[in-house]
Image (tube, coloured by chain):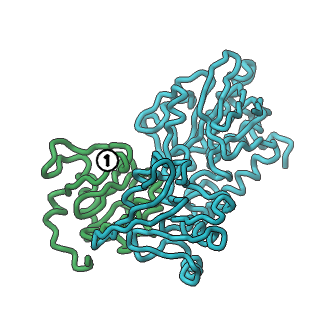
Chain colours: A cyan, B green
């Protein structure tokens, strides 16, 4: 598996992490940014790319997506390495550096780490009672429709993912059934119209009750929300698109000291672990305020303090950016 | 700062918001849903999916619903009728499941005419 070696590893590609990447570059440090999602931007990209943000200094109003683009552009001259779709699951202190291991097996050797993990990494919400069938016919994500060719597929959910996947599976799978708790779907109106015109069998308002099968998924039992009448849907494959939840469990596994799902830091943004700093929504200290603008300040504090650990002859104060060659 | 589920949710409990919440901080009471104020990260994902417009940020609650802010908090930090101890901050509604109780105030509300 590949190994990346950098001065600073930033864990979390939200606004604080992207600004930390800029600051590491500004300090002349090589930097990698790791994130569990497939693109940069963290919660902004995942939850509110089109919303206007009014409390970023210097911007009377800025659209979430545009702020992320600007942060990526600001860090770009320093050529950060982006490690996306990765989760940092392990920490080893090697004295002169630390080794971070990822879920994929990738390792990153870094002289310092800045954790800007926000609310944690996003994972699909599990289907109750489905644990035993994960990977045995039950999937939470549909990256490609090919494995579903010729199968009877049941999709559960009412959002964009559920409707998009049901539509994408139509014509590939032998049959597609979409189960949702409500009559109405939250997916985009256009997708819902396509759904109505499609051959997808829509079953509402029904909730999943149990997944059945001896070794692999054979059927899903659903129950009518009002009449409580049950029905069994035979299927070869089951896709649960029930949204995402975030948690910091994999970071706690490093041995980081946490308080109510946040990482405890001192005034230099240092955590309890050697060479590990934190910044942004994930930090906790008396008086903490969870705002993007505070995260930016913490990112600068974290990186500049980390710089003195990476090179003991460096100073915490970086100098003024106006003195730099870029203009 | 947190989002608050107002009494428009009473007897409806659509639960779309629960699917949207990225931190799983919306808990199911007997007659309505409640947001754990300490666990809420103020992201706003729940607000637009509510079919009865029951969800507001605590800073822009309609005047007749300001009381719901304390009611959401009470659901977690007071001992609910029929329970022995407060729910507190369990760190995820999936772990807890339906709470099968309400605050006294919610219990006393009249049946919601919008519920079928």
At x 67% / y 31%, what residue is drawn?
A: A304
Looking at the image, residue A9 lies above or below residue B51: above
Place of residue A233 in the rendered image (x, y in percent of width and height, measured from the top left): 44, 66
Place of residue B53 in the rendered image (x, y in percent of width and height, measured from the top left): 37, 72
Q: Secondary structure at mark 1?
A: helix
Place of residue A218 in the rendered image (x, y in percent of width and height, measured from the top left): 48, 57
Give the image quarter of residue A188.
bottom right
Residue positioned most to the front = A214
Taking the image as shown, residue A25 lies to the left or right of residue A223, namely: right
Give the image quarter of residue A21.
top right
At x 52% / y 48%, what residue is drawn?
A: A134
Looking at the image, residue A193 lies above or below residue A290: below
Taking the image as shown, residue B66 lies to the left or right of residue A64, namely: left
Name the one closer to the observer, A217 or B104: A217
Residue positioned most to the top = A95
Place of residue B90 in the rendered image (x, y in percent of width and height, measured from the top left): 33, 43
Q: Which residue is mark 1?
A: B96
At x 40% / y 65%, what residue is drawn?
A: A232
Name the one closer to the observer, A61 or A39: A39
Looking at the image, residue A71 lies above or below residue A1: below
Residue positioned most to the bottom = A197
Name the one closer to the observer, A178 or A126: A178
Identify the subunit bearing mark 1.
B
Taking the image as shown, residue A127 lies to the left or right of residue A17, namely: left
């Amino acid at each position: 598996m590949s190994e990346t070696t950098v001065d600073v590893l930033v864990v979390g590609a939200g606004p604080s992490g992207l600004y930390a990447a800029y600051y590491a570059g500004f300090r002349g440090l090589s930097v990698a940014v790791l994130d569990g999602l497939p693109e940069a931007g963290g919660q902004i990209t995942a939850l509110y790319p089109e919303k206007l943000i009014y409390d970023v200094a210097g911007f009377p109003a800025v659209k979430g997506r545009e702020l992320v683009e600007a942060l990526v552009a600001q860090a770009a001259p320093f050529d950060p390495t982006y490690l996306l779709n990765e989760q940092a699951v392990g920490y080893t202190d090697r004295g002169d550096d630390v080794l971070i291991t990822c879920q994929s097996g990738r390792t990153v050797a870094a002289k310092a780490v800045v954790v800007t993990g926000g609310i944690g990494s996003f994972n699909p919400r599990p289907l109750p009672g489905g644990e035993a069938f994960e990977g045995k016919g039950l999937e939470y994500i549909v990256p490609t429709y090919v494995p579903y060719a010729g199968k009877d597929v049941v999709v559960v959910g009412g959002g964009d993912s559920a409707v998009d996947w049901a539509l994408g599976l139509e014509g590939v799978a032998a049959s597609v059934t979409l189960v949702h708790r409500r009559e109405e779907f939250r997916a985009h109106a256009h997708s819902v119209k396509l759904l109505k015109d499609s051959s997808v069998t829509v079953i509402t308002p029904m909730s999943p009750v149990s997944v059945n099968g001896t070794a692999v998924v054979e059927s899903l039992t659903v129950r009518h929300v009002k009449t409580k009448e049950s029905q069994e849907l035979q299927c070869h494959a089951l896709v649960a698109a029930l949204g995402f939840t975030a948690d910091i469990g994999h970071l706690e596994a490093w041995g980081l000291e946490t308080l109510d799902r946040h990482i405890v830091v001192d005034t230099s943004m240092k955590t309890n672990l050697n060479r590990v700093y934190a910044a942004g929504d994930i930090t906790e200290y008396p008086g903490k305020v969870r705002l993007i603008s505070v995260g930016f300040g913490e990112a600068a504090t974290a990186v500049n303090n980390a710089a003195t650990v990476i090179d003991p002859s460096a100073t915490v104060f970086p100098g003024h950016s106006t003195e730099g060659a870029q203009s | 700062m947190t989002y608050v589920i107002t009494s428009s949710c009473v007897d409806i409990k659509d639960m779309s918001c629960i699917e949207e919440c990225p931190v799983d901080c919306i808990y199911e009471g007997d007659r309505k849903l409640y947001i754990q104020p300490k666990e809420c990260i103020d992201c706003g994902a729940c607000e637009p999916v509510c079919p009865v417009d029951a969800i507001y940020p605590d800073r822009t609650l309609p005047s007749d619903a300001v009381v719901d802010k304390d009611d959401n908090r009470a659901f977690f930090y007071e001992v609910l009728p029929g329970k022995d101890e407060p729910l507190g901050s369990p760190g995820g509604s999936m772990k807890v499941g339906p709470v099968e109780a309400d605050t006294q105030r919610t219990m006393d509300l009249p049946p919601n005419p919008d519920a079928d």
